[in-house]
């Protein structure tokens, strides 16, 4: 007499073997390799520590004028963004120099105006394009200005 459970046992064992193998194999979408890898270390935040030489008005003027020279071949849009970053960094340097007593507040104000710095968040207009929201000059002929007596 044949055992009716005979063919069922090998089929059951084969199914269990497939399930066990399936659980051991990595499946796409699961975090297998990434979970084992440690997170990269955080980069340390470094602040420029102003010194007496860096806080001299002449040094600030010279570096402000020279910093964008290597990027002169970039588009006006890129230069405007770089200028925004440069203004933010220069303004932060001026504040730090004043806080450390290496530059007086009046000196910092003079440099702010001389360099044409803008406050953080101010949109720097792209060269060749008008300031957003500003009235554009009209093409109407102008009349000669009166000369003062």
Image (cartoon, rainbow, N blue to C red):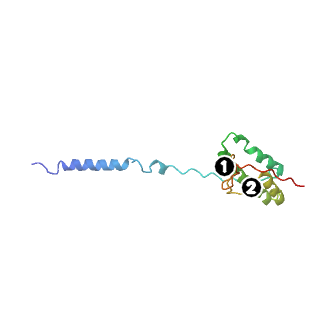
Q: Secondary structure at mark 1?
A: helix
The percent coordinates of residue 105 (x first, y second) are: 82, 60
Residue in the foreground of this view, choosing between 143 and 62: 143
Q: Secondary structure at mark 2?
A: helix
Residue in the foreground of this view, choosing between 50 and 122: 122
The residue that appears at 81% across and 48% down in the rendered structure is 59
The residue that appears at 76% across and 58% down in the rendered structure is 95
Residue carrying label 1: 81
Q: 10 Å neighbourhood of mark 1: few (<14), some, or many (≥20)?
A: some
Quarter occupied by residue 98: bottom right
Label 1 vs label 2, nearer the camera: 1
Quarter occupied by residue 108: bottom right
Residue carrying label 2: 91
CA distance separating discs 1 and 2: 15 Å
The percent coordinates of residue 93 (x first, y second) are: 75, 54
Decide if residue 114 is in sight here: yes
Decide if residue 48 is in sight here: no
């Amino acid at each position: 007499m044949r055992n009716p459970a005979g063919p069922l046992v090998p089929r059951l064992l084969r199914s269990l073997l497939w399930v066990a193998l399936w659980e051991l194999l990595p499946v796409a979408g699961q975090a297998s390799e990434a979970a084992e890898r440690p997170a990269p270390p955080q980069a340390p935040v470094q602040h420029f520590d102003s010194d007496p030489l860096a806080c001299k008005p002449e040094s600030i003027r010279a570096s402000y004028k020279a910093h964008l020279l290597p990027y002169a071949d970039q588009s006006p849009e890129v230069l405007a963004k770089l200028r925004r970053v440069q203004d933010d960094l220069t303004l932060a340097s001026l504040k730090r120099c004043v806080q450390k007593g290496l530059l007086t507040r009046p000196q910092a104000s003079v440099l702010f105006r001389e360099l044409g710095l803008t406050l953080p968040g101010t949109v720097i207009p792209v060269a060749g394009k008008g300031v957003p929201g500003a009235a554009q000059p009209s093409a109407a002929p102008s009349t000669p200005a009166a000369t003062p007596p």
